[in-house]
Amino acid sequence: MSRYFLVKIKIEGFRGINNANKPLELKFKTDAVNSVFAANALGKSSVFEALTYAIKGCIPKLDELPAADRSADYYCNLFHCDRKSFIELIFRPDDSSPDVVITVERKPDGTRRVNSPSGHTDPSKFLEKLGSELSFLDHKTFQKFIEDSPLKRGRSFSTLLGSSQLSEYRQILNSLSNAGNINTDFKLNILETKYDSLIRQEQAIRDRINQNFNKITGNQPKDESDHKTIIQDSTNTLNNEQLLKPFFKDKDIISADYDQIRAAIKKAEGSDERQKLTNVIRSISELDKLGSTENEGQQQFQLKTKLNDRATALEKTRGTLFKRLYQAVQEVLETDEWEDPCICPACNSKLRSSLSETIEENLKQYDNVKQAEIDIESLWGVATWPTRLQKLENSNVLGDKDFEKQYLDLLEKFRNKKITTDDVDNAAAHLIKLEGIRTETLSELKKNKATIEESLPASLVTLTQQVEYADQLKAAIEEYRNLTPAIKLSERIGIIKRWKSFIEKASSLFSQAESEYVIDKTASIETLYRGLYSKITKNPEIIPKLIKAEGSEDLHLKLENFYGIGDVAATTLLSESYRNAFAISLYLCAVLNDKPTAQFMVLDDITSSFDAGHQYAMMEMLRNDIARPSNPDGPQLIILSHDGLLEKYFDTLSGSSSWHHQRLLGLPPKGYVLTQAQESNHLRNEAEKCLNDGNTHGAEPLIRQYLEYKILEIIRKVMIPVSLDFSMRDDRKMVKNGLDAIKTAMDLHKAANRLILEPSQVSDFDNIHVPALVANWVNHYATCSASSLSPYVLMGILETIDIVSDCFKYDCSCTGTLKRRFYRNLSKKDCGC
Amino acid sequence: MSAFKFDINMTVDENIELFFTLMKLIDKEMADLLISNIDKMTPLPDQQRHRTTARVSFNKAILEGLENLIKSKKA
């Protein structure tokens, strides 16, 4: 997979950079450390933000502001003529394939448009891949890392190590394998209860089929699931009876007309006794079906347990108004706008513990109530005892008995979610009473049946019984056919349980492996981050250590050694600069370790908490250990700084091939922000344009800036020594002081006979151009009398400035073509010419 | 120590691929369901209620997949 360097950025109309029709253009070298310096309020942060916005699609600093601040309105430069932002980025792959050019535009309404003039098929996705946590590092980021809670720090660290995706997967699998979630989402508990109930119903019907078959044929079925044979055998038995033969011609026990059969038997018997026997047999059968099942007590116990759960959870809730309040607070706490969970969003009181946890716990009680209600409903739905209660109370056979009817009240209470454990207990007691009445009645009916049977001819008794049992067999078989096959439910439950077992296994394996991975990864970078830390602090008495506990996301910053004391907290003992050094070491270590798609890293003001010595140590570490080209596998560093002292360091190295330095100049947010190279041409062109338009007033400050720039360019390029005052203070960088420094250095080299300049260049500088400049321009401008100069004179001054600069250049033909180059210093050329 | 380990010298994507390969060995049909629906859970939302919505949608898809498996075996 290709990794990408950043080789150029153009910015117009973004944040502090107006640059209407003339974008700020920064070029970066792939095999060098790139530094960009800007004094305060000269656009450095806008460059960092433009890069962040272009690649990540947002500026976190702005997005974190309260909504009332309308931060989205401040992405575009407020003074740009079109109020539009334009950013162009050029990325160079590390595999010699063509550069990728991406443009990002933002309209005043906040619309973002990403294009690729170089023809990349999915420029937005491309930028997304580059936007790793490691591409941008500023002071705020690593300070937050230090100050975060161990949990948040652990999560950031996972991101740094490139393992945040693993952490995310672990959380996902954990949530998916949670037994409660599976029960809720797949309704597994309900399905299992339904299945149990179905199995019991199936068994009860099978028992009835077997009993009735046995009573008709005197045998047990060979295969109780072979209903076809059961029907055939029963039909054959009945068909053997002479009286019944006409009714079973071309019919079986299912299709036979039992009313016709009963009428025929009654006619043959000639009395009402047979009808009484039929009725008694039916009543016995009805009461037999209403017998209690084995698990009624278990069903009642489960229901009471859930009712208790609901009551307990309800006690911990405070009604719907508070539920809405908790939900609103949770929503506020979950937004990025509310950073401190220990402050109440309603009254801003400081709390002792995190409000998030309290709110979560409160809302959980409402969830518990809801879950208990779902469970109660499902248990009620599959329970057999309420139906038995209803049927017993409504049974015609028990119609003349004296008992209270409770079922409808119980059902009403259940529907209104008012049912209590006492109601279940009362209903259970009532059911026991009804069961007593049922048993007693059944016994009476059986006695009655025996009496009737004795009074009837034996053959008719048997015939009547067989017909009734056949009718009951028919009812049982039809009931079985209408029953949802338990096998279907069983398959469904089986495959859900297979998924449950699979996802539990997946979660367990992943969680363990991820935990070990982070621990191993942390250990693997220990030597590196300690080495980097030591190079910044130069203090062997302090050895940092990261502690990542197994099975936890928390990351603790510790010290293995603190002036002889072991295992102490780094965050409480270390000074701010040392804490920052710890965090920076970790971030840099992560870059070397992770090798993100972006092979560049933008560092914005990362040294602001360091003194000069530590700044130097850090820059040396970055240059020698981290960045290309010293570390060929390292990132292309782009360092942004506003530190004047650090710029001296940048300046010193910028002559070498391994360091590329640029300085921002200009007048943001209204005017232009340009680099030195851009600034020079821009100033000259603008001054010329003014003069051609006859606008001397407009040209004068531009000529002044152009002269200042050219003098400073000579000083920098030819390495003219300047006083500390001139170097450190921008207000001392006057033209006259610059010219004096150049003149002094030239005199010194001339006296030592080491001046490389051509005699004509020395003479022109000393005797013609500098005096002309001073006389015609510097003095006039200083006394505000430059306006008396004509455009032609001012045009001449522009040319004189160029000639003065040219006095420090020579013809170089090293590359085969003639080129004017600055001398390396006042005693050397910059090449072998 | 667990039976499965991520390799610190491999990328995260490679490690996740490795994990899915192992899961396929454990139960290919279930692993295929997991892999083809995991994008419903990623990126993991910050807010709990959005996470719940994502999980419910994921499990709904899994249930459909499980039912299709039963049907395909009968067919």
Image (cartoon, rainbow, N blue to C red):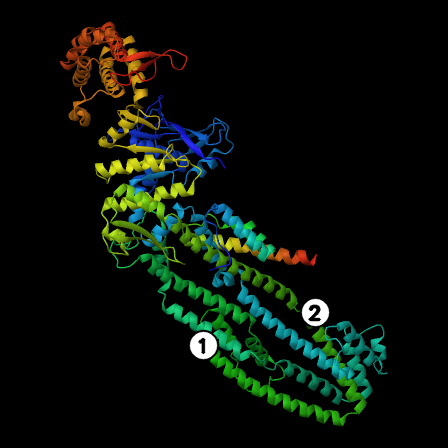
Residue A1 horizontal/vertical position (percent): 50, 37
In the image: residue A328, left or right of residue A826: right
Q: Earlier in the sequence, mark 1 or mark 2?
A: 1
In the rendered image, the quadrant that contains the C terminus of chain A is top left
Q: In the image, which disc is placed on residue A421?
A: 1
At horizontal 78% and vertical 82% (from top left) the residue drawn is A217
Residue A663 appears in the rendering: yes
Residue B50 horizontal/vertical position (percent): 44, 52
Q: Are discs 1 and 2 less than 8 Å apart at CB?
A: no
The chain to which mark 2 is attached is A
In the image: residue A691, left or right of residue A200: left
Q: Label 1 amino acid?
A: Thr
Give the camera-side residue of A753 and B64: A753
Q: Quadrant of residue A204?
A: bottom right
Residue A605 appears in the rendering: no
Q: Label 2 amino acid?
A: Arg
Q: Regarding mark 1 in the picture, which secondary structure is present there?
A: helix
In the image: residue A556, left or right of residue A88: left
Residue A207 horizontal/vertical position (percent): 68, 79
In the image: residue A144, left or right of residue A54: left
Pointer 1: residues within 10 angstroms few (<14), some, or many (20+)?
some
Q: In the image, which disc is placed on residue A85?
A: none
Residue that numbered label 2 is attached to: A481
Above or below — where is B67 with respect to A474? Answer: above
Q: Quadrant of residue A828?
A: top left
